[in-house]
Image: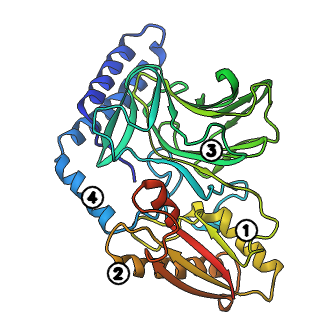
Amino acid sequence: MNRHRIEFPFVVALFVLLGMASASVGHAGLGGALKKKLGDKAKKVEEAVHKEGEDAEEAGRKGEANADGDSAPAATGTGGTAGAGDKVSTVSTKFDFVPGDSVLFLDDFTLDELGEFPARWTLVQGTFEVAELEGERWLRGMSPDGKVRLKLPVSTLPEFWTLEFDLFGTEPMGSAFTVTALGDGDKEAWHAIYPHDRNLFFRSGEIFSTTPLEGGTVGGRHRMMLMARGKSIKAYMDRQRLASVPEILATAGAPREIEIRLAASTKPMITNVRFAQGGRPAKDLLAEGRLVTHGIHFATGSDVVLPESAPILRQIASWMEANPAAKLKVIGHTDNVGATAGNLDLSKRRAASVAQVLSAQLGVAADRFATDGMGDTQAVASNAKPEGRAMNRRVEFAKL
């Protein structure tokens, strides 16, 4: 969903930038277009500011109460790719991101006070605050250059891990977002920058790549994802793979921390940050008779399978093709947010939708699946913390 409600300071910043753009001699050729773009954006934002904030917050709370939150934040908005209407089968095979299963860090900033620095982050440089955009919380960079680090519960990054988060930026945004892995003595192991012109830029020592983001706009909302498997790492934006490095340099030692830099005067923001251990390639997905995955995503409160689910569903379809006599039971699970009866019904419908997508879009015979849902009755982690709820939201496949 494209979101436009933000606090007044952001509007002020846009008007300041508008004035700077029109007064700048060095950018005179771009002044008219830039002035119009910023003016249109500022007008929309100003109108949104005067909406009833209480109504937006109440709608957000109702949305959480009516669904277990079992959805991946989709890269829809002004900058992202298309939404839930797309089919799993249309997603590029180069998009092979599968999130890790053991969630070590999850933050959507709902536990923090508006205007404050979030408790689960370390400030390195600059000024940050928790902001709100149509009932959704974000971490917003208030200074032109700021850096923060995730407070991870590990002293060294796991061998296999994934990091993903939503970002939102308003042009002009320069190189607004940088993710850096730091090793011994805070030495840099690698970094990924967006945008670098219209590209995602990745560097590890002398190894670097610059790959353009296709479609959409540079600004707006996007989802960045990184997947590490040993010394290799891949970087993605929305449903595109934009970097694939088979071996990062080890001169900085094993990466220990993740640092995120927000560097733009237009106050860039991030939210829905998820860091998880896992992602180990499996020779046989169901070698132990059961596969638990967190890589199947749904539209909030519905049973619609999102296209971001393509990588893991393609793996399942390939396994079924390689094992033509096998049959699987698809089982949906939720966390405990919302009514138990509603969660049970939702989990059953979602399991049925997964089987339907595997059949209708990926060519697996429908009679090779049975489906069921357990709702919130079979938790694998405590629902008291966001990380536990994220692990409870899952889809399982069991051999029949």
Give the x, y percent position of residue 327: 71, 87
Look at mark 1 in the image and give the residue it sits on. 315
**Closer to the N terminus: mark 2 or mark 1?**
1
Secondary element type, mark 3: loop
Q: Amino acid at mark 3?
A: Glu
Q: Separation of disc 4 and disc 2 at Cα?
A: 19 Å
Give the x, y percent position of residue 3: 35, 47
Q: Amino acid at mark 1?
A: Gln
Secondary element type, mark 2: helix
Look at mark 4 in the image and give the residue it sits on. 61
Instruction: Tell me the residue at 47%/13% (across/down).
Output: 27
Look at mark 3 in the image and give the residue it sits on. 214
**Closer to the N terminus: mark 1 or mark 3?**
3
Picture layout, residue 101 above or below residue 134: below
Quadrant in which the N terminus is drawn = bottom left
Secondary element type, mark 1: helix
